[in-house]
Image: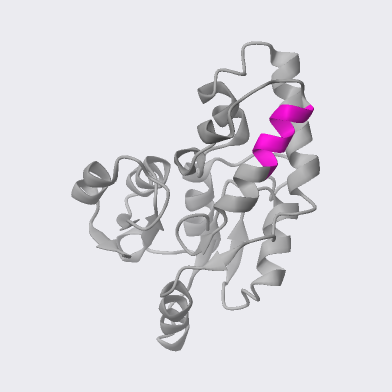
Amino acid sequence: MDGTLLDTANGILGSLYDAIIKSGFEIERSKITNSLIGYKIAEIVDVLGLGKDEKKKAEIIANFRQIYDSSAADGVSWYKYSYNFVNNLKQNHKQMFIATNKPSKATNLIVQKMKIDFVKDIFYPDKYENKVLDKNAMVAEIISKYNLNPSKTVVIGDTDVDLKAARANNCDFGFAKHGYATNVILLAKQADFVYGD
């Protein structure tokens, strides 16, 4: 969803910065960049070098959730061609699913605001009470639940996490080059197709 269908960066990065400051850390706002989008908050905290103390790391994550869960839909916008792209899928009777690292509360706020009603199902890390899904597992769950043929299924995303999820499930990978990846050239070379600006 982030960096593929929707530009959600402003809300995520602003909430992350506020959570870090609220947790007692000092950090330059310029270090909170689009390159962090698409990864789990715990991974981002580690990348920023703030995850050495597990208690403080947990505090940042909790503060982020509190802030972002009430403001996730702020500043979200469609990429200029994404809305038409997914509507074309709908008109051609294709099935579309969202697999996102964003937890359900924030995801649902965005889905409601953006009126995403043409998606067959949405999978997020906390979709099931008894297990936490990573991107590989989400794609596997979609394929299994809806009895999809992996050779006719395409995973579209903007990070190496999405590429790995596609390959782990024997699906083609479509690289959304307008997203938040920093290794654009490498991902474009490894993708089965590229779309976006």
Residues drawn in magenta: 15-22
Above or below, 161 relative to 87: above
Which residue is depicted at the point 31% across and 55% down? 173
Q: Is residue 65 above or below residue 27?
A: below
Magenta includes 19?
yes
Residue depicted at 66% across the width and 36% down the height = 17
Residue 182 as seen in the image, left or right of residue 6:
left
Residue 85 drawn at (x, y percent): 41, 77
Q: Nearer the viewer, residue 178 or 127?
A: 178
Up/down of 163 relative to 177, above or below: above
Majority secondary structure of magenta residues: helix
Q: Is residue 168 left or right of residue 194?
A: right
Locate residue 175 relative to residue 17 in the image: left or right: left
- Comparing 125 with 46, the one in front is 46
Q: Is residue 15 visible?
A: yes
- Seen from the viewer's position, the closer of residues 11 and 2 is 11
Pinpoint residue 182: horizontal percent, then vertical percent: 35, 41
State which quadrant residue 168 falls in. top left
